[in-house]
């Protein structure tokens, strides 16, 4: 679920509180703070999308030919003896 950022609307000029809420996309925006009941408005910010570790990237990083080419050894674990041996 996405995390939305909200800020309280302060009428007395004091510092507003900024908080985050995890909500479904289909949920309407909050109108009141869930704890103190003050009116709030949603802060629109750029999305935080992590594309560094997608499933395709994971397959690419775990490709054995690339691992060996980088100078690493690949080990497998024997199911019976639980010992590791070089593949």
Image (cartoon, rainbow, N blue to C red):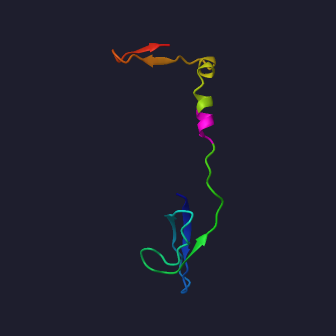
Q: Residue at x 53, y 62 (%)?
A: 24
Please state the extent of the stretch shown in magenta in the rendering. Answer: 52-58
Give the vertical position of 77 relative to 41 (above or below): above
Where residue 45 appears, x then y in whole percent?
A: 64, 63
Quadrant of the rendered structure where residue 67 is?
A: top right
Left or right: 18 in relation to 80: right
Compared across the picture, whether 63 is left or right of 76 comes to right
Image coordinates for residue 72, horizontal then vertical, percent: 56, 19
User: Could you say where residue 47 lies in the image, as x and y percent from the top left?
Assistant: 63, 57
Decide: is 4 above or below 84. below
Is 14 left or right of 56, judged from the image as shown? Answer: left
Residue ID at (58%, 34%): 58
Q: Could you tell me which residue is drawn at 35 percent across and 18 percent down?
A: 82
Residue 23 x %, y %: 51, 64
Q: Can you say whether 2 is above or below 75 in the image?
A: below
Q: Answer above or below: position of 21 versus 50.
A: below
- Residue at 62 percent across and 35 percent down: it is 57
> In the picture, residue 9 is in which quadrant?
bottom right
Report if residue 54 lies within the magenta region: yes
Q: Is residue 71 left or right of residue 20?
A: right
Q: In the image, is residue 1 part of the stretch drawn in magenta?
A: no
- Residue sticking out furthest to the right: 46
């Amino acid at each position: 679920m996405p995390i939305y950022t909200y800020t309280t609307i302060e009428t007395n000029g004091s510092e507003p509180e900024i908080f985050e809420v995890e909500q479904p996309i289909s949920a309407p925006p909050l109108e009141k703070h869930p704890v103190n009941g003050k009116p709030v408005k949603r802060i629109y910010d750029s999305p935080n999308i992590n594309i560094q570790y997608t499933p395709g990237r994971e397959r690419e990083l775990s490709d054995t030919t690339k691992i060996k080419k980088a100078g690493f050894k690949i080990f497998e674990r024997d199911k019976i003896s639980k010992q590791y041996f070089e593949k």
